[in-house]
Amino acid sequence: MAEQTSYCGGTCQGCAIYLATRLDDEHKRLEMRTEIARQIETIYGHHCHPEDIADCDGCKATSGRFFNTDCAIRNCARQKNLESCTSCRDYPCDQLKELSSAEEKAME
């Protein structure tokens, strides 16, 4: 399977939300989403429940299934018709810097 990269540079195949979407086992999917919700609260300080973790086919997919439809980075890149944020003249912008403060490897 080819690696799918998000606008901000993350790989979908390394994303727990993307991986949970692909599970056939409902019990395992719930376990993963419970852990994802816990990590979101721990890392980002946002409280959410497992049922808040929506299916996601990656931010570049055309399926309409995205975890965060309000993602400012995704919306900006799509508006500018960019393949990646690294193609933007404003790279790295404040939004990416904020993301990288919570995700150590984000700017790599």
Image: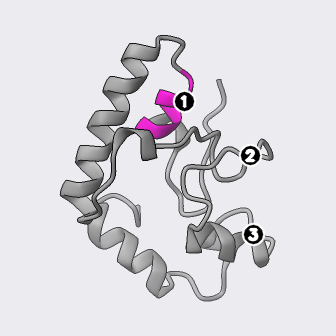
Three-letter residue code for mark 3: Arg
Q: Nearer the viewer, mark 1 or mark 3?
A: 1
- Residue 76: % across, % down: 67, 77
Q: Is residue 45 visible?
A: yes
Residue 20 colored in magenta in the image:
yes
Residue 79 in the image: above or below residue 70:
below
Density class for disc 3 (Cα within 10 Å; few <14, some 14-19, many ≥20) is some
Three-letter residue code for mark 2: Ala
Colouring: one colour
Q: Is residue 15 visible?
A: no
Tell me which corner region of the image, top left, top right, bottom left or bottom right, holds residue 77: bottom right
Cα distance between the residues tagged 2 and 1: 13 Å
Q: Residue at x 47, y 80 (%)?
A: 95
Drawn side of residue 31 relative to residue 13, left or right: left
Image quarter hosting the C terminus: bottom left
Q: Residue at x 71, y 52 (%)?
A: 60
Drawn side of residue 40 relative to residue 64, left or right: left
Q: Residue at x 66, y 80 (%)?
A: 88
Drawn side of residue 49 relative to residue 66, left or right: left
Report the residue marked by disc 2: 61
Tell me which corner region of the image, top left, top right, bottom left or bottom right, holds residue 91: bottom right
Three-letter residue code for mark 1: Thr
Q: Residue at x 80, y 46 (%)?
A: 62
Residue 72 in the image: above or below residue 6:
below
Report the residue marked by disc 3: 78
SS under mark 2: loop
Query: Which circle marks residue 68 in the picture?
Result: none
* Segment tinted magenta in the rendering: 16-22
Report the residue marked by disc 1: 21
- Residue 43: % across, % down: 23, 59
Residue 78 in the image: above or below residue 43:
below
Q: Nearer the viewer, mark 2 or mark 1?
A: 1
